[in-house]
Amino acid sequence: MKLLHVDSSALGVHSVSRGLTAAVVAEFKNNHADLEVVYRDLAAAPLAHWTPVADAADPASIEANRVMDEFLAADVVVLGAPMYNFGIPSTLKAWIDRIAVAGKTFRYTANGPEGLVGDKRLIVASSRGGIYSQGTPAAGLDFQENYLRAVFAFLGINEIEFVRAEGVAMSADHKDVAVQGALAGVGSLLRKAA
Ligand SMILES: Cc1cc2nc3c(=O)[nH]c(=O)nc-3n(C[C@H](O)[C@H](O)[C@H](O)COP(=O)(O)O)c2cc1C
């Protein structure tokens, strides 16, 4: 089984989402002896923004192809996605710009767009300072999880599993409860896979 682990938080060891993705990946390792993990840190090594390809031998093109190959090869993708200004970090957006490619991960047909990414499990570790869950007053400002749902559904992955710690900027206590709650959910996520 191949697992692609992607982090995008710029907060390093202080990051909530990095802690959550690490816990999810550790759980997969415990449950799958044959697990192969590919790791990408989009904060430590940001991808070049998308531009029209002038030269396939260009380092940015070569890296873009590697990003696509990693994504297509993965059975499971574990994505660390903090909320930045109601959306996702621009480093993560630059990664999505490299995996959402017409003819590879989606295509346009006479009946509309069609996602081409087959059977792939996507687990998103979502961290956010405030509270945006459905039914809360700020839910309409969630352009982070809702965006990820939309873009991956467009690519053919209709069900994202979220491990979520929200309200982490509200107080130290709230953060602890949110992170512990998210970590407690990791085991059941994996049991669902068994
Ligand atoms: C640049 C930046 C923008 C942020 N924007 C928001 C925001 O719009 N809404 C929010 O609730 N929290 C926001 N936060 C707080 C983060 O979502 C929160 O600290 C989260 O834990 C970040 O994930 P991380 O700990 O994995 O880095 C922002 C943090 C940063 C650094």
Image (cartoon, rainbow, N blue to C red):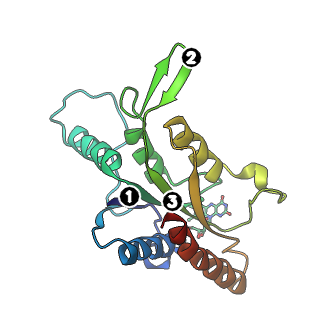
**Amino acid type of the residue tagged 1 in the rendering:** Leu
67 relative position to 154: left or right: left
Image location of residue 73, percent across then percent down: 30, 48
User: Which residue was labeled with disc 2?
Assistant: 111
**Amino acid type of the residue tagged 2 in the rendering:** Asn
Give the CA distance from mark 1 to mark 3: 17 Å
Q: Quadrant of ligand 1?
A: bottom right
Residue at 54%, 35% in the rendered image: 154
Instruction: Say if disc 1 is inside 8 Å of ligand 1.
Output: no
Is residue 62 shown above or below 113?
below
**Residue 179 seen:** yes
- Number of marks in picture: 3
Q: Quadrant of the N terminus?
A: bottom left
Residue at 39%, 41% in the rendered image: 99
**Amino acid type of the residue tagged 3 in the rendering:** Ile
User: Which residue was labeled with disc 1?
Assistant: 42
Is residue 188 shown above or below 56?
below
113 relative position to 165: left or right: left
Residue at 51%, 55% in the rendered image: 89
Sequence-wise, the earlier of marks 1 and 3 is 1
